[in-house]
Image (cartoon, grey):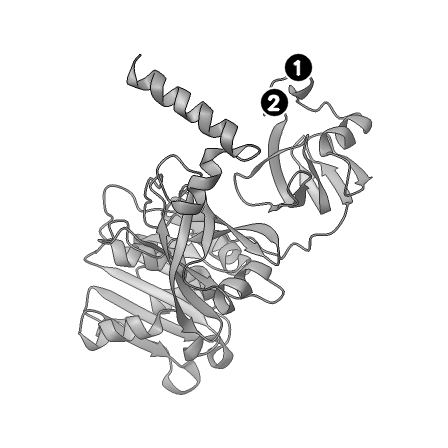
Amino acid sequence: MTSTALRSRAWKLLEMVTTPLLPSDYLDLVSPLRAGADLRGRIEAVHAETRDAATIVIRPGRGWRGHTAGQYVRIGVDVDGVRLWRAYSLTSPANRQDGRVTITVKAIPDGKVSNHLVRRAKPGTLIQLDQATGDFVLPEVKPAKVLYLTAGSGITPVMGMLRDTEFDDVVMVHCAPQPQDVIFRSELHDLAADKKLRLTEVHTDTDGMLDIAAADKKLRLTEVHTDTDGMLDIARLDELVPDWAERETWACGPAGMLDAAERHWSEHGVPERLHTERFRPSVVVAGDGGEVTFSTTGKTVDADGATPLLEVGEEAGVLMPSGCRMGICFGCVTPLKAGAVRDLRTGEITEAEPGVLIQTCVSAAAGPCDIEQ
């Protein structure tokens, strides 16, 4: 008998002994980050960045395939007995020596996961992981001149880029309400003290406009403190960064800033030089049932929190893809464009993020939601 056959018989025997659980369930308790297991990570440290932001150091399981600077990762966190998923930018360099990765989270009002991670997460906690994804990344051929335009937590994917890739000529304009609200400010000032970058704080009420000609280092950082300086007017880039139109630009922040940037770059005929990353704009409040929109057909119906969306759609006359009744699994998978759904098997809440797919045969509305059908 071959070694493969022996292993197969041994595994079947273990399944009989451990039923109704599987041997893998016990292995998960002993070695949850092992190769072949569902991809997980272990929180190893939580470092405060500001009064409402923290960096989470994660040791990913052996199935982790790495990331490119600027990408994000979806994580599943158990909060008060419910598994919730969120997407966060990776802030660690792609080639970190110890194999760990970091995300930096800003707690938002009523944000269940963000507040949990910033204020309650402890080393040793296991979380679920998806593979890194996203196209807000640098090109293989480095541009000669780069501009990073960020605000608030929009600095997080750019910080991953700064830690990962050096450029000869980089300008960064970052907006935050007050100096103490600038995430990574201590690290940036340490770099400034080492004379590795030029740091300029703009207080327009007292200092006037920035004289950019005075900066002669590789990285020029401008902080705009909106509580005293007011919101950044994109038109001010002509003064803050006179050669902005010549620079390849990566921008991340509030929707209003990004909308203004896209108009500005288009009006000046260089829209291809602007790359933007938009975070989820609102907090989803999960409930039991809600209004379900099938965006492709334009139909909208009310649904309870117990009926699978597959049945809700069919009853509304929507042609729903499905192979469930023929024993073909995952034939009903479809994108969740907005809102939240609940897995009827586990109670797990899934919220809309770019690229999120759901099984409509086992998912019910957990508040208003939009299904791409």
What mark, if any, has residue 326 been given in the picture? Answer: 1
- Give the label, 1 or 2, closer to the camera: 1
Residue 331 location, quadrant: top right
Picture layout, residue 206 above or below residue 93: below
Q: How many badges with numbers are in the image? A: 2
Q: Earlier in the sequence, mark 1 or mark 2?
A: 1
Question: Any mark on residue 265, and which?
Answer: none
Helix or strand or loop: what does disc 2 sit on?
A: loop
Q: Quadrant of the C terminus?
A: top right
Give left or right: position of 40 versus 243.
right
Residue 32 visible somewhere in the drawing: no
Label 1 sits on a secondary structure element that is: helix
Q: Residue at x 42, y 40 (%)?
A: 27
The structure residue drawn at horizontal position 22% and vertical position 69%, both measured from the top left corner, is 197
Is 53 placed left or right of 60 in the picture?
Answer: right
**Residue for point 38% across, 55% down:** 157
The amino acid type found where label 1 is placed reads Met
Location of mark 2 (residue): 331
Q: x, y percentage for residue 94?
A: 28, 49
Tags 1 and 2 in contact by the CB under 8 Å rule? Answer: yes
- Residue 34 vs residue 208, the one in the foreground: 34
Could you say which is closer to the camera, residue 146 or residue 324?
A: 324
Q: Nearer the viewer, residue 325 or 196?
A: 325
Q: Position of residue 41 (x, y in %)?
A: 40, 50
